[in-house]
Amino acid sequence: MAAKKTRKSARAKGAGRRAGLAMSQAEKAAYTEIKQGVKHLEKSISEITKGLRKTEKAIEADARARVRALRADARAQLGVLKSKQREAKSQLKQVSAAAGGSWQEIKQSADAILADARATAASVVDRLRDAITR
């Protein structure tokens, strides 16, 4: 069964019209001014929304660029660390062959190489953390 539409009576419509006609000039001016204020407010809201979208896109683009730069920097630093690792391996082979039985010298040399590699790795991690927290 279809719902019945409710209709306003002719008397209710006429009363609204009479109230509109009975407004004084000052009331009409105030009403118009308020109406214009509402329109200006709508425009302001629209402009703010557009500005927010534009700003959000700019921030996202900046973030993507920063992530790309961080990845490139991380790849470069990983390359440095891998080269240090290769260097440490080759030096360990050379030292162990040259030292013969003196493992104390070998251990000291390896410790120095590994300490340098750890310091490099720690600085890479610190730089990445600093870049992320900015």
Image (spheres, rainbow, N blue to C red):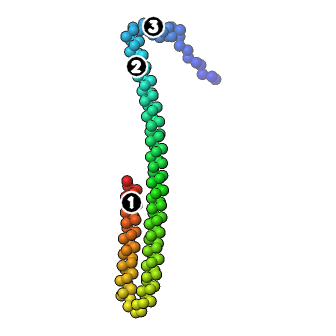
Q: Quadrant of residue 66?
A: bottom left
Q: In this figure, which residue is indicated by the disc labeled 1? A: 129
Give the residue at x 39% y 78%: 113
Q: How far apart in space, not on screen, are marks 1 and 2 (Cα)?
A: 53 Å
Give the residue at x 45% y 78%: 87
Image height check: is 39 above or below 108?
Answer: above
- Across and down, in percent, residue 107 comes to 37, 84
Give the residue at x 40% y 18%: 33
Q: Residue furthest right?
A: 1
Q: What residue type is labelled 1?
A: Arg
Please identify, in this view, whether the residue under mark 3 or under mark 1 is nearer the observer. Answer: 1
Q: In this figure, which residue is indicated by the disc labeled 2? A: 34
- Across and down, in percent, residue 56 comes to 45, 43
Is the residue under label 3 in contact with that under label 2 (CB below 8 Å)?
Answer: no
Q: Is mark 2 on a helix, strand or loop?
A: helix
Please identify, in this view, whether the residue under mark 2 or under mark 3 is nearer the observer. Answer: 2
Q: How far apart in space, not on screen, are marks 3 and 1 (Cα)?
A: 70 Å
Q: In this figure, which residue is indicated by the disc labeled 3? A: 21
Q: Is mark 3 on a helix, strand or loop?
A: helix
